[in-house]
Image: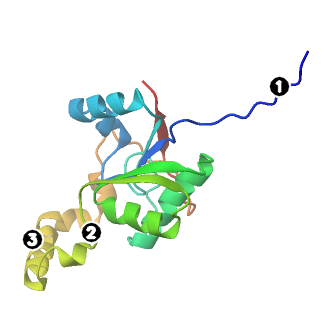
Amino acid sequence: MPKLPIQYLEMVPPLVIPPPWVTSLRFVIEDPFMNQFLEQLAQKVTVVFYDKHGCGQSDRDREEFTLESELLDLETVVNHLGLDKFNLLGSSMSGPISIAFTARYPNRVSRLVLYGTYANGKKLAKKKVQLAIISLTRSILGPWLQNPRRYVHPRCECRGSSKSCQISATIIQF
C-alpha cells in the first residue's frame, strides 16, 4: 500500500455571528425570518451564533458592559470552538465588536461582513440627542433596571451564577 499523506483543508471558514442585540438563541431560532436566514447560511457554511452574556441561557452575573467585555465573550467562544480562522458578521450592536476583534486579530478573520451597524456609537447623534435617548430609556426601563431578575421572561432559563464567562453557544447546522 502506498504512503499517501493527507492534509485536511477547510474550504470555507465558519461564520461567527456575535449577538446583535439582547435576546436569546431560542427566540432567534424560533423567529421565522431569522430561522430562514440562518438556514440558508448554514447550507453553505457552518454558522456559530451565541447568547450575549447576561441574556438567554448565559450566566446572569454580568457586571461589566464594555466593548472589552464583549470582545472577551467573542474570544471565549471562538477559542472554545478551536476556530483559528473564521468569517465574522457584525450587525447592529455587534458591529463595533466585530470591527474591534478584526483590528486586534487580523490574521484570525478571513472576511468581515458589516450590516446595519456603526463603528462608534458615540458619533451617531449629538450629545443632546444622546442624553434624551438615555433619559427616555431610563424612564421606560426604570423598574427593570432596578431589579432585572424579576423581569426575566419565564421561557428563558437562568444558568448558574458563577463569575466565569460561560456563554451559551450553538453551532447551527440544518
Task: Relative to 15, say whether 164 is above or below.
Answer: below
Secondary structure of residue under mark 2: helix
Q: From the image, which quarter does the C terminus lie in?
A: top left
Image colouring: rainbow
Q: Nearer the viewer, residue 115 or 72?
A: 115
First in sequence: mark 2 or mark 1?
Answer: 1
Dot 1 surroundings within 10 Å: few (below 14), some, or many (20 or more)? few
Q: Amino acid at mark 1?
A: Leu
Q: Nearer the viewer, residue 107 or 37?
A: 107
Q: Amino acid at mark 3?
A: Leu
Q: Position of residue 109 (x, y in %)?
A: 49, 55
Tell me the residue that label 2 is attached to. Answer: 146
Q: Position of residue 143 (x, y in %)?
A: 20, 65
Residue depicted at x 33% and y 58%? 94
Task: Relative to 69, say whether 37 is above or below.
Answer: above
Residue depicted at x 23% and y 62%? 144
Give left or right: position of 15 versus 9. left
Residue placed farthest to the front in the image? 2
Task: Indicate the quadrant where residue 81 lies.
Answer: top right
Tell me the residue that label 3 is attached to. Answer: 136
Number of marks present in the image shown:
3
Q: From the image, which quarter does the N terminus lie in?
A: top right
Q: Amino acid at mark 2?
A: Gln
Task: Relative to 82, say whether 27 is above or below.
Answer: above
Q: Position of residue 54 (x, y in %)?
A: 40, 57
- Give the numbered dot on residue 4: 1
First in sequence: mark 1 or mark 3?
Answer: 1
Give left or right: position of 114 versus 137. right
**What is the spatial separation of the Cα atoms under label 2 and label 3, in whole angstroms?**
16 Å
